[in-house]
Image (cartoon, rainbow, N blue to C red):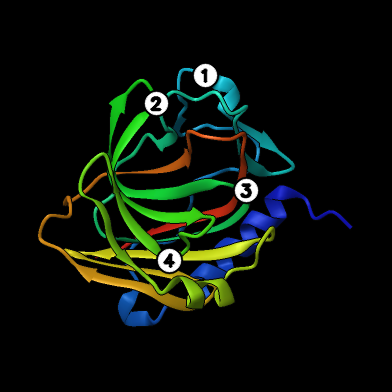
């Protein structure tokens, strides 16, 4: 049975709120993706790179990108917990946080990688490159290849934590992290690829 998108989003938000400890509560969780269209997001110049199918954001390339491209949130965020489900068919993608849109579909800043061989990697797009990586052999045991993977990304001050399927893979404090920025999803140069995102919820923290 296919559950209507509006009902599913309500359930996701209710779960996100219920699982927060009272002391951690800030603003109420908000769906960043409405399950229907890309309202609230800035698309790259090539509109075909990101579409909505079956209540999911789909990033898809034909293998001809000249540079990495991103679907970016219109709003900037400072301290928050971001939850999203990610399904990677192949190749390389990621979730940008506290990042900066540079125009022409380009984004720079911290990225939680979702990529073959690089799950559990913290990468600074357009900057310092690899900052930290969870042991690849251990990451392979956590990730559900070709299926949905739960990401929980929390930024509080200069501390960033990333969890994949309930396992903390990154816990880094870095004075060079930006104080605020956008959220963005990546499609990567190289071979034709596909990645999907759904149940994207953010809770801003006090």
Mark 3 vs 2, N-terminal side: 3
Kind of element beneath mark 1: loop
State the image coordinates of residue 174 (x, y, percent, origin top left).
15, 63
Q: Residues within 10 Å of mark 2 (few under 14, many from 20)?
A: some
Given this view, does label 4 or label 2 mark the residue nearer the observer?
Answer: 4
Eyeballing the image, is 19 above or below 47? below
Q: Mark 2 and mark 1 in contact (Cβ < 8 Å)?
A: yes
- Cα–Cα gap, marks 3 and 2: 21 Å
State the image coordinates of residue 190 (x, y, percent, origin top left).
52, 34
The residue at which mark 4 appears reads as: 120
Kind of element beneath mark 2: loop
Eyeballing the image, is 44 above or below 41? above
Mark 4 vs 2, N-terminal side: 2
The residue at which mark 1 appears reads as: 46
The residue at which mark 3 appears reads as: 90
Name the one closer to the observer, 23 or 115. 115
């Amino acid at each position: 049975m296919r559950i209507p998108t509006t009902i599913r989003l309500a359930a996701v938000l209710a779960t996100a709120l219920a699982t927060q400890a009272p002391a951690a509560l800030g603003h109420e969780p908000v769906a960043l993706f409405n399950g229907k269209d890309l309202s609230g997001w800035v698309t790259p110049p090539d509109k075909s790179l990101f579409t909505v199918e079956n209540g999911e954001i789909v990033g898809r390339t034909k293998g001809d990108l000249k540079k990495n491209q991103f679907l970016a949130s219109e709003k900037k965020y400072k301290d928050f917990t971001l939850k999203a489900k990610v399904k990677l068919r192949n190749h390389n993608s990621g979730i940008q946080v506290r990042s900066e849109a540079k125009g022409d579909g380009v984004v720079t800043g911290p990225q939680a990688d979702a990529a073959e061989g690089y799950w559990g990697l913290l990468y600074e797009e357009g900057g310092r490159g690899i900052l930290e990586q969870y042991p690849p052999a251990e990451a392979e045991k956590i990730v559900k290849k070709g299926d949905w993977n739960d990401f929980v990304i929390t930024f509080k001050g200069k501390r960033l934590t990333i969890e994949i399927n309930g396992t903390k893979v990154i816990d880094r404090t870095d004075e060079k992290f930006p104080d605020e920025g956008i959220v963005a999803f990546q499609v990567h140069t190289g071979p034709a690829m596909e990645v999907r995102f759904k149940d994207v919820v953010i809770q801003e923290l006090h």
